[in-house]
Amino acid sequence: MNILRTLFLLALAALVPVAAAACGGDDDDEPAPAATDTAPATAGASPTATPRPSGSITVYSGRGEALVKPLFEQFTKETGITVNVKYGDSAQLATLLAEEGAASPADVFFAQDAGALGAMTKAGRFAALPEATLAKVPAAYRAKDGTWVGVSGRARVIVYNTSLTEAELPASVKQLTDPKWKGQVGWAPTNGSFQAFVTALRKLEGEAAAEKWLREMLANDVKVYKDNRAIVSAVAAGEVKLGLVNHYYLWGFIKDQGEGFAARNHYTAPGDPGTLVNVAGVGLLKTSKNRPAAQAFIDYLLSDAAQEYFVKQTYEYPLVSGKSADPRLPALETLKPPAIDLSDLDDLQGTLALLRKVGALQ
C-alpha cells in the first residue's frame, strides 16, 4: 500500500464514527417514497447501447434502500441487468472502496453527496464518463474531470415558522448570530448535509470565519436536533422559529399534513452559503467487471423516468438540463448558490475536527 493510499484510508476512517451517529447519512432521514407509487414510469426504449449490455452489476449505494430500491428494480425490469446493492453511509462506503482497492466487487458508487464522490476522484478510483452522459447535466453539478455526475439536487434553506413574515427573515445564514435569534434557531450537527454545508462555509469564507460563525451560533443558544426532519417538526410546532435544513423535508410534511402545515422554506440571498446546492451522484469504478452494464445504469439515473421519480417522490431537483422541479419550488437556475466546486466538499475530516474544536460535536 503506498503512502497516498494509506493517508486516504486514515482520512476516510476518521469520518465513520460521526457519520454513523447521523443514522446512516442524510438519506436515512429523508421522507420515503409513497407506498402506492414507488416505481418510476417505464421510460420506453432502454437507455443502453448496441450490443445491449447484460449480466449483473454491483452498486455501493449511500442512498437509502427505501428511497432508491424502486429505481433499481425498474432498471432491471427494463434492461434485464441484475443490480446487486450494498447500502450504507456514503463515507463508510468510500472507506470500504479504498480498503478493497482493485479487489472491490463494486461497479458503481452512488453517493448521497459530492464530497464522497470528490474523495473517490482524488483517490483515482473513478473512470472518466462519456461526454454524452456528462453533457446531460450542467457543469456545476458534475466533476470537472468527468469522473462523476450528479443525478439529483438538494438546496440548503432556512425553514421558518409561518408566524414570521418574509421581511423578517435573514438574507444570510451569517445573520443568524444576531441576538434577536437567540434560542430560536435549530441545527443538526451530526447530519451529513449540515456537515457538507460547514465544509462549503470553510471553503468560501475561510477557516477562521467558519470557526467564528460556529462559535457565535453556539453563544446564541442554537438548539440541537437529531436530524432535518426533527428540525422541521420543531419549527412548525413553535419550539424554534428557524432551522437549517435541506429543502425537501418540508414538502414531505406538507404531503402528509396538508398546506396548513405551519412552516415554509426561505432561500437566502444569491451567493450565500445558506443556499448551497449539493448533489447525489454516481461514478464508475475503474475496476468494474461489467462497464457496459454499469454505464447503462448511470445513464438510466439520468433518464426521464428516473428524473421524474426524484421530482415526484422526494421533491429533489432534477439535474438533467431541461427538466423541471415540482412547480412549488423555485427553479434551480434562479437560486444562484455560492460558486464552489462541489468536488471540494471532500474535506469532511477537517469539518469534523472544527465542529469538535468549537464544541458542536463531542
Image (tube, rainbow, N blue to C red):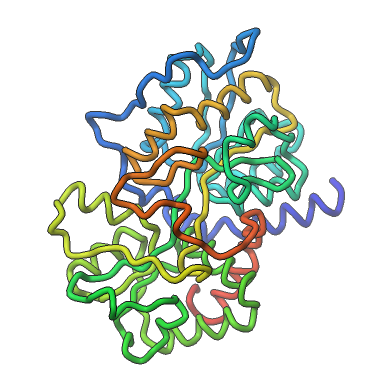
Q: Is residue 350 left or right of residue 38?
A: right
Tell me which corner region of the image, top left, top right, bottom left or bottom right, holds residue 43. top left
View extreme (bottom): residue: 179
Q: Position of residue 18 (x, y in %)?
A: 52, 61
Q: Is residue 223 left or right of residue 56?
A: left
The answer to which image quadrant residue 341 occupies is bottom right
Q: Nearer the viewer, residue 251 or 208?
A: 251
Please tell me which residue is depicted at 42% across the width and 22% down the height of the picture: 73
Q: Is residue 63 above or below residue 192?
A: above
Q: Is residue 245 above or below residue 314?
A: below
In the image, residue 76 sits, relative to residue 32, either above or below, namely: above
Image quadrant in which the N terminus is located: top right
Residue displayed at 47% across by 80% down? 174
Front position in the image: 347 or 209: 209
Number of numbered labels in the structure image: 0
Q: Residue at x 62, y 62 (%)?
A: 340
As drawn, the residue found furthest toward the top would be 51
Q: Position of residue 53 (x, y in %)?
A: 61, 12
Q: Percent from the top left, x then y, of residue 5?
A: 80, 50
- Measuring 51% from the left and 32% from the top, which residue is drawn there? 302
